[in-house]
Amino acid sequence: MDIRIENLTKRYGPQTAVNNISFEVKPGEILGFLGPNGAGKTTTMKMITSYVNIDEGNIFIGGKSIATDAASLKKHIGYLPEHNPLYLEMAIMDYLGFCASLQGVSKSEIPARTREMIRVCGLNQEKHKRIGELSKGYRQRVGLAQAMIHDPEILILDEPTSGLDPNQIVEIRELIKTLGRQKTVVLSTHILPEVEATCDRILIINKGNIVADGTANTLRKQAKGQEVLQVTIEDGDPQEIYSKLQSLYTSQLVDLVPEQPHQFLIESVTEMSSKREVFKLCVQNNWVLSELTPLETKLEDIFRDLTLN
């Protein structure tokens, strides 16, 4: 089931939290929804799940408008909010059974769905405990279980790995990837390596506006900085090497690496590569080229460039 957002706007008094945004999420796609605090991520997710009313624009789920079919569409959506609301006095099994009942799971199927979520979310050892007795990581797992208890076609997950230890993050990441083969997933997180490991596509929002949309590789190609090479050139005077590297028509910027007198960083001119020119320069001057490594633009750097304005 797909999600289509058209010209979506939400205001809180004089502040515009979401400003006329449009995007689509296809079935079987995991969308990483990124942005700094206050960018509009959580507000957008709450509008998709009908927790917050839309001021302008529309959201279509499976071709149906939330404006007219919100009640019937909710059963197709599983939602894990940023601040995971749980009934701490309830036992895990009772809570998941209660959530299944609220989501319209038939009484005869509730025990099987509850057992399945206990297994899938790694709660078997804790299943007889009260939620208030659990660690934050296990409470997050309970939140994921309630979001999936009714086997929804769409999952909206706001910071799903918050509070988990590294092993648990890997497990939940693999679970989300598995679910993404069959469901439409919108995933919000501040852990950028998690986005690359989990998501098919990345959408970055800043101050209520979409500032980037594409795969990690696409965003890197579009990012400011172009090709960056780390090279080590020996058997020559570092200042002479530095000067001649600067004179290459393909190089935009050359930096010396501190405490490494024969190592340089070369930023190439947009849509040009300096690899071949560096090699030719070393051959012409009888220098030894002992390293030539392309440095990949980090997703963290792209995120900062797009959201610090």
Image (cartoon, rainbow, N blue to C red):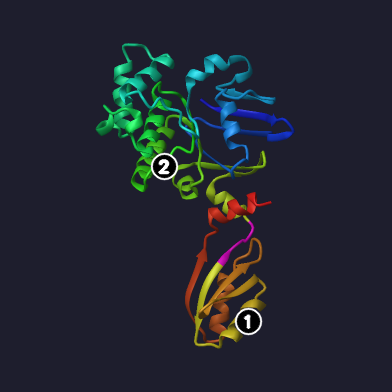
Q: Which mark is residue 123?
A: none
Check if residue 227 falls in the magenta segment.
yes
Q: CA distance from mark 1 to mark 2?
A: 51 Å
User: Which amino acid type is shown beneath numbered disc 2?
Assistant: Gly
Mark 1 Cα shell of 10 Å, populated few (<14), some (14-19), many (≥20): few
Callout 1, which amino acid?
Lys
Foreground residue, 229 or 38?
A: 38
In the image, taking residue 38 as reference, residue 155 lies left or right, namely left
Tell me which segment is drawn in magenta: 224-228
Q: Residue at x 53, y 14 (%)?
A: 72
Question: Hey, which residue is sitting farthest top in the picture?
Answer: 107
Q: Identify which residue is drawn at 64% across, 61% down.
A: 271
**Residue that label 2 marks:** 163
140 relative to 15 in the view: left or right: left
- Residue in the image at 53% along x and 42% along y: 201
SS for callout 2: loop
Mark 1–mark 2 CB contact (< 8 Å) = no
The number of discs equals 2
Residue ranking furthest to the right = 14
* Quadrant assignment, res 300: bottom right
Of 220 and 147, nearer the camera is 147
Residue 91 left/right relative to 193 = left
Regarding mark 1 in the picture, which secondary structure is present there? helix
In this view, the residue in front, 117 or 133, is: 133
x, y percent for residue 37: 59, 43
